[in-house]
Amino acid sequence: MNLKNKLIGIVTMIFIVAMAMTFTYGEEAEKTEHWKWVTDANGTRYESENDYAKSKWLKIEGEYYYFNEEGYIEKDCYIQGYWLNEEGKWVKAYSGGKWYKDSTGWWYQDNGWYPVDSWQKIDGNYYHFDERGYMEASCYTDGYWINSEGIRNKTPYTENWTDDENGRKWGDNNLNTRNRWLKIEGEYYYFNKEGYIEKNCYIQGCWLNEEGKWVKAYSRGKWYKDSTGWWYQDNGWYPVSSWQKIDGNHYYFNSYGYMESSAYVKGRWLNSSGAWDKNYSDGHWVQNETGWWYEDNGWYPANQKLRIDCATYYFDSNGYMATDYIIVSIMEQMLYYYNEGSLKLKTPIVTGNYGDYNTPKGMYRIGNKARNIYLTGPGYRSYVNYWMPFIGNSYGFHDAQWRSSFGGRIYLTNGSHGCVNMPYTNAMALFNMITSNKTLVIIE
C-alpha cells in the first residue's frame, strides 16, 4: 500500500474549503418550535408537524448533518467525502474521503488514514476492507454477500455448506458457484464444473488443502520442463513418487520428480499429456502357462513396449511379455523363469525389507555371475554360494542359507537389504540355467 502513504495532502484541503463554501451559502434550519428532533426504531429525524428534512445537508444549531432519503440522519459513515460521527455530526478534521485505485484494487482514504480489516459505510453503502486496506468484492463476509462493486447486500445470507456423496457445495441457490473462485468468510475456495469445492489439489497455481481452503504459502505452482521431461514445482517443492491433482487432472510423478506419460501407474492409464484417463483404470498383470501379459478391461499391448509403474516392458505379437525372462513378483514373493515360452523354474523368495530396503522394480540384465563370495555392507558380511547381480554389484539373486523359510509376508518385517534371497537348491538351479546378460523384470 505504498501509494497510499504518498498521497498529497492538498486533496484534503480542497475538500474542506469546498465544504465550507457549501455550508456558508447552504441551508440553515430556523430556530422554531415547529421543528424538532424525533427518534424512532429506524433512527433520528428533524421534522415539523407536516414535513421533515431528507436527502440534504442541514446546519442545525451550528452542527452539520446529512439526512438520507428516508429523512434519517446518517451516522458513523462518510457522505460525499465527509465523516459523520456517532451523533451524526460532521467532523471537520476528516473531510477528504476519496476512492483510490492501483493495480491491486480499490481503497478509501482520508487525510492519510484508510480502513483496514473492517466495514465502512460510504455514501449509503457498506463496504468491507481487507487486512491490507483493499475493498473486497464478490465474496461472503460476516454473513453478508458483497457484490462485484464491493457493495454489501442489505440482508444477511441464510445459505450454508451442504455435503453429499460427491463432495461439498455452497448452498446459495441464487449464485452461480461453478468454475469459479469464491471467498467465504475470509477463506478462498474453488468450485468445479459440478459446483463442488476442490480439495487437496492445485488450481491455477494455488494449493487447496483438505478442507478446500487456499493455502497462501503455496501459491506459485507452475509446470517446468528440461531435456528429461516435465515436473510441477511450487516455491522450491515438487511432488516425488506420488499422485498430484492439478487443474482438475491427476498426474503421477516418479522418484525423480518427473511426470509420467503414455504409461500405466497403479493400473491407471496416463495419456500423452500425463493426465489420468479414467476410461482406462483397471490395468493389471495376468499369467497363464505360457507367460505374463498386461491388460485393461479386455485390452492388452501386443508387439510393442509399454511403460508400467515407472519401468519399460516389451510384449510380443501375441501380447505376452517377451520370453526368456526372469520375473520377480514382489506382491507374490515369487520368482519365475521362462525360457522359450515355458516355465523352467518357480520358487518362493524374499525381497528387500519393505519401506527400508525395497527391491527396485523395473527391467534389468544379469551381470557377471560368481561363486563363493562375500556380500558386504553397513553392518553385515554374508557368504553366498551363488551370486547373480543385476544392478552393478549392489543388487542380485543369491542363496540365503541363514533363512529357514521363503515367500509369504516375510519381506514386510524381515526382508533383505534389497537383494532377492532364494533357497539354496533353487539358486543353484537358476545359476546353472541362465547366462550373463539374461533379461529380468521386477514387478509389484
Image (cartoon, grey):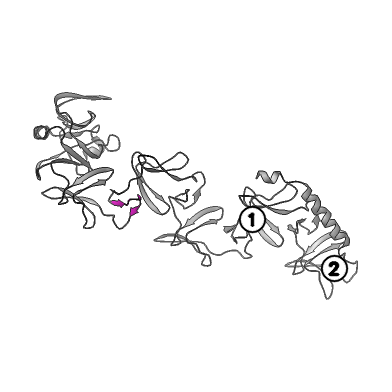
Q: What residue is drawn where x is 61% and y is 50%?
A: 104
Residue 168 lies in what quarter of the image? bottom left
Residue 125 lies in what quarter of the image? bottom right
Q: What residue is drawn where x is 50% and y is 50%?
A: 214
Residue 183 lies in what quarter of the image? bottom right
Q: Amino acid at mark 1?
A: His
Relative height, residue 292 to residue 56 (above, below) = above
Whether the residues at callouts 1 and 2 have beta carbons within 8 Å, the answer is no
Label 2 sits on residue: 36
In the rendered image, the quadrant that contains the N terminus is: top right
Residue 394 drawn in magenta? no
Mark 1 to mark 2 CA distance (whole Å): 35 Å
**Which circle marks residue 303 in the picture?**
none
Q: Nearer the viewer, mark 1 or mark 2?
A: 1
- Could you tell me residue 427's position as x and y percent? 12, 33
Residue 61 shows up from this direction: no
Residue 58 shows up from this direction: yes
Q: Amino acid at mark 2?
A: Lys
Crowd rating for badge 2 (residues with CA inside 10 Å; few <14, some 14–19, many 20+): few
Most extreme residue toward the front, as rendered? Answer: 227
In the rendered image, the quadrant that contains the C terminus is: top left
* Mark 2 secondary-structure assignment: strand
Residue 272 drawn in magenta? yes
* Mark 1 secondary-structure assignment: strand
Q: Where does the magenta region start and end?
A: 268-277
Q: Is 254 left, or right, of 124 in this rendering? A: left
**In this orientation, which residue lies closer to the viewer: 329 or 165?**
329
Q: What residue is drawn where x is 49% and y is 51%?
A: 213
**In this orientation, which residue lies closer to the viewer: 268 or 166?**
268
Which one is earlier in the sequence, the residue at label 1 or at label 2?
A: 2
Label 1 sits on residue: 128
